Image (cartoon, rainbow, N blue to C red):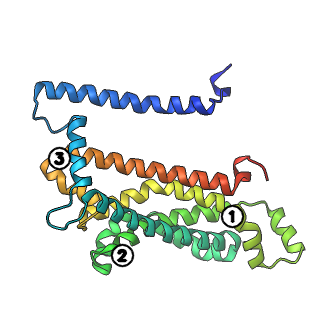
Amino acid sequence: MRWVNRQPRKGERLLLGSLPILALLLLYLILAAQRHAANPMDKVLPLPATMVASLKTLIFEPDPLTGQFVFLADTLASLQTLGLGLAISTLTALLLGLVLGTLPPMRATFGPLVTGIAVIPPIALLPILFIALGLGETAKVALIAIGISPVMVRDIAAHVAALPREQIIKAQTLGASSWQVMIRVALPQAMPRLLQAVRLSLGPAWVFLISAEAIAADVGLGYRIFLVRRYLSMDIIIPYVAWIALLAIMMDVLLTFLSRRCFPWAHGGGH
């Protein structure tokens, strides 16, 4: 059988997907062991035991100044900011995407504006947001929303605009208004695409969050990473980066599960 026609089963997919990760972990352990054999005080590639000890302190021992458990406080602060940004972006993408995709006059009027905003590097707006909104959470949430909303809006609008014209004609033949076409025809078919758009926006959203926390924050995963980098504390940076990656993966898996569970017809699972 040609490889192009081979479809791995679920167990095979898990095995094949884990192989590159295990290979990278093994490579790291080999390189770390070599560096520590040459220099026991090496900080660039800390050994797993060192990372576990440092992370254990952040997880189980309260900070002497604030009394907070640092790892938990950082995680909750970042997830709260990220969640608000994603929620605002998702709602904005759904509403504007439906309007622009269903109504050609609205698309002709506001489509260029959305496109113009989408091509602006969001990080370039960060100083403006901090000046206008202050250094609190509002500016960070706004950066995430501005960074990913326009791209999501364009994606949903293009998907809705590409729906078969026959569906809209049939709905109008049955007496549907523009509002009813939007709600009864476009909305159900836009929802799976919306979840896919959120999945694709998770990476940029994390980038904007970490960037904002690195510049102005007193708690958060990004803040902690950039705080300890001055001490070359790779034993904290690497676990934090791995934790961010794990959180992103779990969010992606959850969105995939919701899409398949709520809209099986969009994944070839029936009608």
Q: Residue at x 34, y 31 (%)?
A: 25
Amino acid carrying label 3: it is Ser
**Disc 2 to disc 3, C-alpha distance:** 30 Å
Q: Position of residue 254 (x, y in %)?
A: 54, 53
Secondary structure beneath dot 2 equals: helix
Callout in the foreground (1, 2): 2
Along the polypeptide, which appears first: circle 1 or circle 2? 2
Classify 10 Å Cα crowding around label 3: few (below 14), some (14-19), many (20 and above): some
Where is mark 3, residue-wise?
A: 233
- CA–CA distance between discs 1 and 2? 31 Å
Q: Which of the numbered marks, if any, corresponds to residue 138?
A: 2
Residue 153 appears in which quarter of the rendering? bottom right
Residue wearing tag 1: 160
Disc ID at residue 243: none
Residue 128 placed where, x, y %?
31, 74
Q: Which amino acid is tagged 2?
A: Thr
The residue positioned farthest toward the top in the image shown? 1
Closest to the observer: 146 or 39? Answer: 39
Left or right: 85 in relation to 108: left
Identify the amino acid type marked 1.
Val
Quarter of the image that includes the N terminus: top right
